[in-house]
Amino acid sequence: MLDIGCGTGQLTDYFRAIGFATVGVDSSTAMLRHRVQHRSGRPGLVAAAGAAGLPLVGQFDLITLTFNVFNHLPDQTAAKSVLAEVARLLAPTGLCVFDINTELGLRQTGELTEIRVGGSDRIVWCRRWAGDRLVLDASGSFLDGGAWHPYRERIHKRVIHTAEFEGWCEASGLLRPSWRSDDLTTPLEDPEESAIAYGLIRGPAAPSSADDADAATGGRSEVLSP
């Protein structure tokens, strides 16, 4: 199982616990370091790399890109490059699972200010629109080692329409995704009417009668090389 944009490893921890060999890739070395040091005694293989150029060979039965990885990419060229990597690494009978924030979902959170005060963090999120993307400015502080540390980050989330995404898949040699709700089984007749659309992309030789939800948890990887 390959998790692109794995962060601190919640998803790979789950799949490793049910028997998968896992590889996690993220561009944030800080998140990967946290994962190795704190999340698990057996963190699995990790690699620090951008999603558009993965230092991997072999094929994976399951590839995941969740927490809106595609919305965070800077432009459609980057998105197409990531999909080309998925096409290169997805096993013929494998499954790719991803999610995207639709324009509806992003606009529901636009022009909002949100304040979080927790025991170990104090953060203010300010959201605003800039062209075709939602800009999230986060600032505050977090508790670490008995001291409070300042925190500031700007995140861009670009609008992606499901129809254009389907075109990118075809251009990359992938099958068109099947759009589902968050249970991964209920089809979405119009994914643009959902705040978050989940997509399932089968490998070209995957049996068309296979149940997608079973496929997402029942495969096993045999050839994994970082």
Image (cartoon, rainbow, N blue to C red):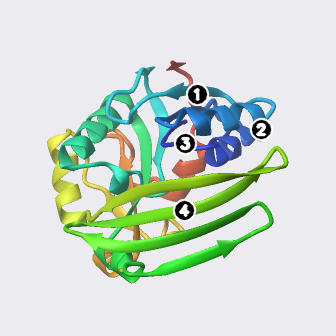
Mark 3: amino acid: Cys
Depth check: give the residue in front, 173 or 226: 226
Of marks 2 and 1, which one's residue comes earlier in the chain? 2
- Residue that carries the numbered disc 3 in the rendered image: 6
Label 1 CA crowd tier, 10 Å (few <14, some 14–19, many 20+): many
Tell me the distance, in whole angstroms, between the alpha carbons under discs 3 and 1: 9 Å
Mark positioned earlier in the residue sequence (3 or 1): 3
The numbered dot on residue 139 is: 4
Residue at mark 1 to residue at mark 4: CA–CA distance: 29 Å
The residues tagged by marks 2 and 1 sit, at their Cα atoms, a distance apart of 14 Å
> Residue, x 61% and y 32% (percent of image)?
22
In the image shown, does 66 or 26 lie closer to the viewer? 26
Picture layout, residue 111 above or below residue 163? below
| Mark 2 or 1, closer to the camera | 2
| Location of residue 58 in the rendering, given as x and y in whole percent from the top left corner | 43, 20
Quick check: marks 3 and 1 in contact, CB under 8 Å?
A: yes
Q: Residue furthest right?
A: 146
Of mark 3 and mark 4, the one earlier in the sequence is: 3
Mark 1 and mark 4 in contact? Answer it, CB < 8 Å.
Answer: no
Q: Which numbered disc, 2 or 3, marks the residue that appears first in the sequence? A: 3
The three-letter code of the residue at mark 4 reads: Ser
Residue 46 — which label? 1
> Percent x, y for residue 47?
53, 26
Question: Residues under labels 2 and 3: Cα distance?
Answer: 15 Å
